[in-house]
Image (cartoon, rainbow, N blue to C red):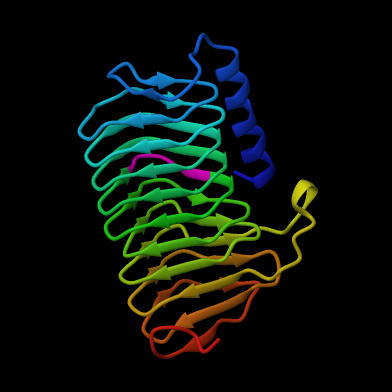
Amino acid sequence: MRHCDLAAALVVLAGALTGCDVSGGDVTATQAGANTVNGSIHVPAGMHSANVGTVNGSIDIEDNAAVGAAGTVNGSIDMGAHATADSLETVNGAVALGAGAHVAGTVTTVNGAMHLQDGADVAGRAGNVNGHIVLAGAHVAGGLRTVGGDIDVTGTSRVEGGIVVEKSSGWFNFNSREPRIVIGPGAAVSGTLRFERDVRLYVSDKATIGPVMGATAIRFSGDRPPD
């Protein structure tokens, strides 16, 4: 999905929620799910819930909980350890996956960071437009994608489907800063690493990567690049 399509798709979420019979204020999910307009959603630990969605508010999915699709427009999404979801989507907000958390589909945000902890697993693609993406011993099967965000693939992280840094265009043409991409020691990225704009690409001499298009990899030793 191109970044402009992602933004449009997520804005539809706002219209869908505001057009439904939903409550206002903070809510706690039940097995039937939860929707609200101006409020956060809490999914208790161990709860098995259907879809959850809000317009202005965060979504907190506690340890060992399970939800269907989780989406918000203005707010973060936080998954606890070993929690599961079908997909995660936000427009303005960060996304965090705890240790061993699993997402069966995609994880997407427009303006927000992503942090995937040890053992977190995303079966689809993970991507944003702006915001730092950090994988700390995590697995992403569908590749990573960004426009202006930095990416750190650390520890024993594995990425299949490559990495794409898209060219700034349309709404996001203002971002001229070069993204910084680091593939750390012990990490592996299979598939093509494709860069449609200038980036700083650092690859550990103990990392494994696929073919690189549009950039020159700078090899480094030790835990981090020198800069």
**Relative depth, front residue between 13 and 165:** 13
Taking the image as shown, residue 62 lies to the left or right of residue 15, namely: left
The outermost residue toward the top is 21
Q: Position of residue 188 (x, y in %)?
A: 37, 70
Image quadrant occupied by the C terminus: bottom right
Taking the image as shown, residue 64 lies to the left or right of residue 77, namely: left
Q: Position of residue 14 (x, y in %)?
A: 60, 25
**107 in magenta:** yes
* Residue drawn 29% across the image and 19% down it: 30
Residue 9 vertical position relative to residue 124 in the rendered view, above or below: above
Q: Which residues are magenta?
A: 103-108
* Residue drawn 34% across the image and 66% down it: 157
Q: Position of residue 87 (x, y in %)?
A: 42, 36
Q: Position of residue 120 (x, y in %)?
A: 31, 53
* Residue drawn 72% across the image and 68% down it: 177
**Relative depth, front residue between 62 and 9:** 62
Q: Determine which quarter of the picture holds residue 50.
A: top left
**93 in magenta:** no
Image quadrant occupied by the N terminus: top right
Taking the image as shown, residue 11 lies to the left or right of residue 225, namely: right
Residue 79 vertical position relative to residue 160 in the rendered view, above or below: above
Residue 70 vertical position relative to residue 81 in the rendered view, above or below: above
The outermost residue toward the front is 25
Residue 7 vertical position relative to residue 186 in the rendered view, above or below: above
**Relative depth, front residue between 61 and 182:** 61
* Residue drawn 29% across the image and 24% down it: 49
